[in-house]
Image (spheres, helix red, strand yellow):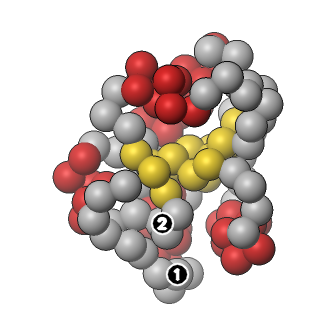
Amino acid sequence: MGDIRTIDREELKAKLDRGDDFTLVMTLNDWAFRAQHIPGSIHFHTQEEALAALGADRGAEIVVYCSDAACVASQYAYEGLVEAGFTNVRRYEGGLSDWAEAGYPFESGEN
């Protein structure tokens, strides 16, 4: 995989607290998403669904994440979005484990 642009926990938390205009995508499976996700996250069942839902604005800011730095789901999602022409994608490498380590809140349930 090529160079992946990242965002750290504090920057992501600040963006959420400010209500910045960006899309936060959890790249794990449905069960994991329903169990817990970072507030404001959305989830897609397939890459095709994600590409259709994220729309034609290839410059829109998108942050992808999964469980932790070793999890490859967000890496693959990142690469897929970049290959589809999205130009403002970043990966929250620490994912759920890093978010939990800071004691930040989670949500559960559907999109």
Q: Which residue is drawn at 29% across and 58% down?
A: 110
Asked whether, in this view, residue 107 is left or right of residue 61, the answer is left
Q: What residue type is labelled 1?
A: Tyr
User: Which quarter of the figure is the N terminus placed in?
Assistant: top right
Would you place residue 103 above or below residue 7 in this image?
below
- Give the residue pinned by disc 2: 38
Horizontal and vertical percent position of residue 105:
47, 81
Q: Which of 89 and 92 is in front in this view?
A: 89
Q: Do the residues labelled 1 and 2 touch (CB within 8 Å)?
A: yes
Q: Which residue is drawn at 35% across and 45% down?
A: 28
Task: Please rate how many residues cluster around mark 1, counting C-alpha atoms within 10 Å: few if below 14, some from 14 to 19, many from 20.
Answer: few
Q: Which residue is drawn at 55% across and 58% down?
A: 94
For numbered disc 2, what is the local secondary structure? loop
Rounded to the nearest angstrom, the CA distance separating label 1 from label 2 is 8 Å
Horizontal and vertical percent position of residue 99:
52, 71
> Can residue 3 be seen here?
no
For numbered disc 1, what is the local secondary structure? loop
Horizontal and vertical percent position of residue 111:
37, 55
> Can residue 18 be seen here?
yes
Horizontal and vertical percent position of residue 36:
33, 66
Asked whether, in this view, residue 1 is left or right of residue 22, the answer is left
Nearest to N terminus: mark 1 or mark 2? 2
Asked whether, in this view, residue 9 is left or right of residue 44, the answer is right
- Give the residue pinned by disc 1: 104
Asked whether, in this view, residue 47 is left or right of residue 35, the answer is right
User: In the rendered image, which quarter is residue 55 located in?
Assistant: top right
Task: Please rate how many residues cluster around mark 2, counting C-alpha atoms within 10 Å: few if below 14, some from 14 to 19, many from 20.
Answer: many
Q: What residue type is labelled 2?
A: Ile
Would you place residue 110 above or below residue 62 in this image?
below
Would you place residue 102 above or below residue 29 in this image?
below
